[in-house]
Image (spheres, rainbow, N blue to C red):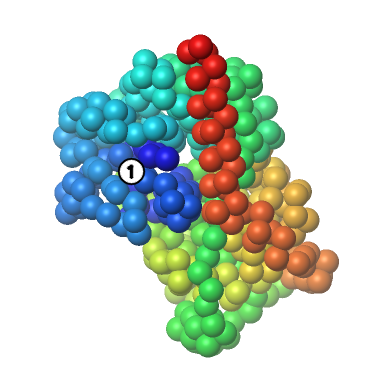
Amino acid sequence: MRVLIVLTYYRPHTSGLTIYAEHLARAMVGRGHQVTVLTSQYEQQLPTEEYVDGVRVVRAPVLFRISKGVIMPTFGLLANRLVLQHDVIHLHLPQFDAAGIALRGRILKKPTVITYHCDLRMPPGLMAFIANVAVRFMNNLAALLTHRIVTYTRDYAENSSYLRRYIHKLQVIPPPVTLPDVSQKDIDGFAHQHNPDNQHPVIGMSARFATEKGVEVLLGAIPRLLEVYPKALVLFAGPYKNIIGEEKYWERLYPTIQKYLSSGNWKFLGNLNPNQMAQYYPNLDVLVLPSLNSTEAFGLVQIEAMMNGVPTVASNLPGVRQPVLLHEMGKIIPIGDSNALAEAIIEILAKPDAYKRDPKPIKQRYLPDTIAKEYEKLFTELNEELRNQAI
């Protein structure tokens, strides 16, 4: 099967969406399929075409940006050629260009599937508002044209203004989540490098430094945590400098963060590769996901933590609360409540055994190969449907 995956950003850009697409693309290649990713050349130094782990990556040059969106004049021409060359089309939304690809799939009778990752919320401003309206319109058009829409959880779908309209097209498939195996020596080496004073407890947050992630909620919880655990350490894993569209957010929070950097209670680790992430999680006592709105639909990092026996504290958002509810490894807090976050962390630290579970079933459920099989089945079913319609 020749699979065309289309999304605005792909690796090396780091987000839950790009990691999802990368894991699935690799798994499909591992199962013998030909996979091409059509995406943006969001940084000029990235090649316009290359093979990465057996996946062909084609990047359309970016003429200019509107907030986090990109304008790619040659995207349509690339799409024309690639849609003709492939058997199935897999779109990742939100994405402005998805409707045009879905239309091509509909005309050519090629199975077209959307994976909807989250609702879109642009930062304030006239141009961002216009971009938001345009993307929503195009996403709805894409949904009308596509054959199926995949979402992570029914919980998120039923609470999404977008997905509720297309329940008849909906299919729930969990996200692919995996980390490489690392040795205890590597895990200890990570601890020695990033926590040489053996501070305890270690609270992790793994995210882009972005408005929707709720970094301020964790900052608001720290004073209470330090009352109980003066040597508590926050290890923030993920990009945090010069995040597109998040400059003002950084400027607003940095003075508070600087205080905790100086006291040794906060440390930025930057963007970690998969091996480093596999060393990171076992060094945590708890992971927090204090997200603030529906741009967060699940939180793949929760599953990564649980695979390593680490409980999580998550906001009571549709979809985001599901890993804790499904696997009973953590606590759910009201959205934006720093006091509740602090008390939840303290409770987990006081009774760690109450939140431990066997990680093996969790690992198996989210294996990229397991998820790739579910997509294979979906693509096959759609092929059968389209053949029957043609008869």
Residue drawn at x 48%, y 13% as measured from the top left: 390
Q: Is residue 178 above or below residue 82?
A: below
Q: Is residue 133 visible to us here?
A: no
On the rendered image, what quadrant is the N terminus found in? Answer: top left
Horizontal side, residue 258 vs residue 289: left or right: left
Horizontal side, residue 116 vs residue 1: left or right: right
Choose between 311 and 40: the one closer to the eye. Answer: 40
Q: Is residue 201 above or below residue 361?
A: below
Residue 37: percent from left, percent from top? 33, 43
Residue 5 figure quarter: top left
Q: Pointer 1: what residue?
A: 36
Mark 1 Cα shell of 10 Å, populated few (<14), some (14-19), many (≥20):
many
Choose between 101 and 138: the one closer to the eye. Answer: 101
Residue 81: percent from left, percent from top? 23, 30
Q: Is residue 13 above or below residue 386?
A: below
The three-letter amino acid code for the residue at tag 1 is Thr
Q: Judging from the image, what secondary structure is the residue with disc 1 in?
A: strand
Residue drawn at x 45%, y 71% as measured from the top left: 275
Q: Is residue 49 visible to us here?
A: yes
Horizontal side, residue 311 vs residue 146: left or right: right
Residue 268: percent from left, percent from top? 43, 68
Residue drawn at x 69%, y 69% as measured from the top left: 309
